């Protein structure tokens, strides 16, 4: 089975690209959704996150991602601490899903903002797709679709590795500075290549 990475900064349109890939019948493993599962009640990283960040991040006994996010988006050390706890649990869960899919599928895409973070592409990837979009447009989209104010949107973008740093690692660049039809057309082109390789 070939495993491809799909990455891009917050507000870039990566999730919309993932939905379009899924419409071609390609399974998508959403690392963000897996991240929610591992800190949910009973999740693999729940206890360690509460131990590290305290009960102030809880609402009704469960980790409140809003409260946790407020702490980590503004504090690089806190973000690193959270990542060191959560990423191994996410990696394990994703590996198990890939193994389960390998029995019946040739291609899978892992949708994850944090792929290729350290200046190199993960060894298990057959290829990397990078969704790019100018920062100002990303801010507009975050304000319009996520309900955050402009200052918070800019903070979130600044907290991530600039996606342009991953350009040299990308096998395909998906430009999302145009409209949704242009994004879909580019995803369709890449999906055709992925499925051809798989066959």
Image (tube, rainbow, N blue to C red):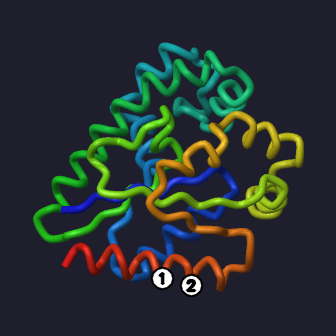
C-alpha separation, residue under disc 2 versus residue under disc 1: 5 Å
Percent x, y of residue 31: 43, 49
7 or 75: nearer the eye?
Answer: 7
Number of the label disc, if any, that sits on residue 87: none
Q: For residue 87, which quarter of the picture?
A: top left
Give the SS element for disc 1: helix
Q: Quadrant of the N terminus?
A: bottom left
Give the SS element for disc 2: helix
Residue at the outermost left position:
103
Query: CB under 8 Å between callouts 2 and 1?
Result: yes
27 sits to left or right of 151: left
179 or 170: nearer the eye?
Answer: 170
Residue 158 lies, with reference to residue 17, above or below; the image says: above
Residue at the outermost right position:
150
Q: Quadrant of the C terminus?
A: bottom left
Residue 94 lies, with reference to residue 88, above or below; the image says: below
- Residue at 40% x, 43% y is 121
* Residue of label 2: 185
* Residue of label 1: 188
């Amino acid at each position: 089975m070939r495993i491809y990475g799909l990455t891009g900064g917050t507000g870039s349109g990566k999730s919309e690209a993932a939905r379009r890939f899924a419409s071609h019948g390609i399974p998508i493993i959403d690392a963000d959704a897996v991240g929610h599962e591992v800190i949910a009640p009973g999740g693999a990283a729940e206890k360690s996150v509460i131990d590290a960040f305290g009960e102030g991040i809880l609402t009704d006994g469960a980790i409140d991602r809003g409260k946790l996010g407020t702490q980590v988006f503004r504090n690089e050390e806190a973000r690193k601490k959270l990542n060191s706890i959560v990423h191994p649990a996410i990696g394990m869960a994703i590996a198990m899903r890939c193994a389960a899919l390998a029995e019946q599928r040739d291609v899978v895409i892992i949708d994850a903002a944090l792929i290729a973070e350290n200046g190199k592409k993960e060894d298990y990837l057959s290829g990397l797709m990078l969704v790019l979009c100018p920062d100002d447009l990303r801010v507009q989209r975050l304000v319009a679709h996520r309900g955050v104010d402009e200052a918070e949107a800019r903070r979130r973008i600044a907290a991530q590795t600039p996606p342009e740093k991953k350009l040299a690692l990308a096998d395909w660049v998906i430009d999302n500075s145009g409209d949704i039809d242009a994004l879909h057309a580019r995803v369709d082109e890449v999906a055709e290549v992925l499925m051809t390789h798989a066959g």
